[in-house]
Image: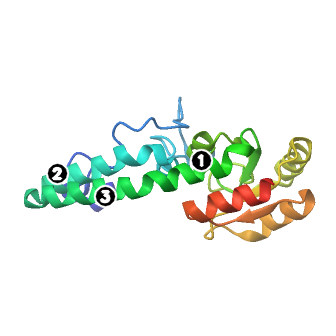
Amino acid sequence: MEGAGNPKLLRGSPNVVEASPGVQLLRVPTGVIDRSMGDVHPLGNPHYTLDPSNIPLVTSNIVAGLTRVVPELAAPLELNRVRFLEALAPIERRWRATLAPFRGAPVVSYHDSWPYFYQAFGLVDGGVIEDRPGIPPSPQHLVSLIRRMSEQRAKIILLENWYPADVANLVARKTGAEEYVAHMDYLVRAVADNLR
């Protein structure tokens, strides 16, 4: 975005709708950040919508941003937001009830996308297959992760479908875990089913 040289696309422009203001961002790196650290998100982990409790604030930010651009749509946008949150509330309760018996269970992921999900549902980060964000794991890292997963009795690996499955499948075979690609509803059901 910055490389495009278009000020309309830059953070702070009235044309840019930011969903995260007010969200307590996790995994915000400190100190010097450089490419040797991999594809680090310098502003913190951006996967905050995996915690349903962030959705009221995120949708409020989206409505505010869109209203700034198209003020005449303020009322219908807010009405749609309220309806969405009302529909989401019982589903979120179902998700929480589904995963409640598994609080404290370790979960491994291919990429560090899941801290908000873990926090929301009381799961424990059991490790990440990638050595560093965007960097394939070294053999030493995999050996260490497999040992740790076995010690923790981690049963599942979360893998988004855009990451390579071969390494996750290897780790799953070595530890008896399974991987899942998820939208929230599917993810909650899949995590709960496999933790059983």
The mark that comes first in sequence, 3 or 2, is: 2
Disc 2 residue type (three-letter): Pro
Would you place residue 32 above or below residue 141 in this image?
Answer: above
Q: Position of residue 104 (x, y in %)?
A: 74, 38
Q: Residue at x 44, y 51 (%)?
A: 89
Would you place residue 107 above or below residue 176 in this image?
Answer: above
| Residue 75 falls left or right of residue 168 | left
| Residue 167 falls left or right of residue 8 | right
Q: Position of residue 105 (x, y in %)?
A: 77, 43
Q: Which residue is mark 2?
A: 14
Q: Residue at x 86, y 42 (%)?
A: 152
The mark that comes first in sequence, 1 or 2, is: 2
- Secondary structure of the residue carrying tag 1 is helix
Q: Position of residue 171 (x, y in %)?
A: 85, 60
Residue at the extreme left: 72
Q: Which residue is mark 3?
A: 83
